[in-house]
Amino acid sequence: MKTFEMPLSQDEERACLMRFREGDMEARNTLIERNLRLVAHIAKKYQSPEYDSDDLISIGIIGLIKAVTTFDCEKNSRLGTYAARCIENELLMMLRARKKLTREVSMYEKIGIDQEGRELRLMDVLESEPVDILEDLELEKNIERLNHCLPRVLSDRELQVICERYGLCGCEERTQREIAKSLGISRSYVSRLEKRAVEKLKAEFERAEQCG
């Protein structure tokens, strides 16, 4: 377990800040090192099997460095208060970026083949903008097929997860973590349910294509 130095006293912090403003980089390093305990404390709130603690601390340190660099003694009372916001913001930006990437990967998963032999992805059914009447009809057919498949192919729990993950059936789009919290289950179990649901829909679309 990592151990961090204790924070500076208010007088020590003020002295380091004044020296840093005069160009003393050693003072800057001291401000960063003596606030690493704050980074670890904030990063701990986001700790989970999905996010490695060392990665979270590394991202938090970026926020701390930004805080030390931009802190204005005349506008802010304590560096710690200002730094906490910067660290939190940096972590939230990283988490949002990963959430977006995870969703994009899921949306690109192949679930079948269209009439012209092209790969059909979940994104194609949910988000495509048709460019002509034939494509419009094809999209409507796929959406109708998807809506028909959902309750017939998926279990109640799988249906709830897939609808809430992708904003289907009038549900608001939510993260795996949000769904896990509302259902009282783990995020990893939500991930397995989502993957299983997509696999079932994929198999159903492929079966339908084979049957014509």
Image (cartoon, rainbow, N blue to C red):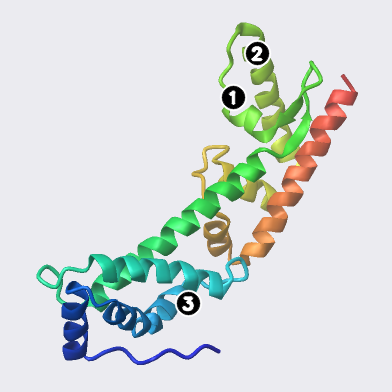
Find residue 133 and report its horizontal and vertical position in percent.
61, 7
- Please say if the residues under marks 2 and 1 sit with CB atoms less than 8 Å apart: yes
Q: Is residue 49 left or right of residue 75?
A: right
- Please state the total of marks drawn on the protein image: 3
Give the mark, 1 or 3, whose residue is nearer the N terminus.
3
Find residue 55 and report its horizontal and vertical position in percent.
54, 69
Find residue 142 and report its horizontal and vertical position in percent.
69, 24
At x 17%, y 85%, the residue is 15
Q: Amino acid at mark 2?
A: Glu
At x 52%, y 58%, the residue is 178
Quadrant of the image containing the N terminus: bottom right
In three-dimensional space, the C-alpha distance between marks 1 and 3, rounded to whole angstroms, equals 40 Å
Q: Which mark is residue 135?
A: 2
45 or 191, which lies in front? 45
Disc 1 is placed on an element classified as: loop
Residue under label 3: 44
Front disc: 3 or 2 = 3
Disc 3 is placed on an element classified as: helix
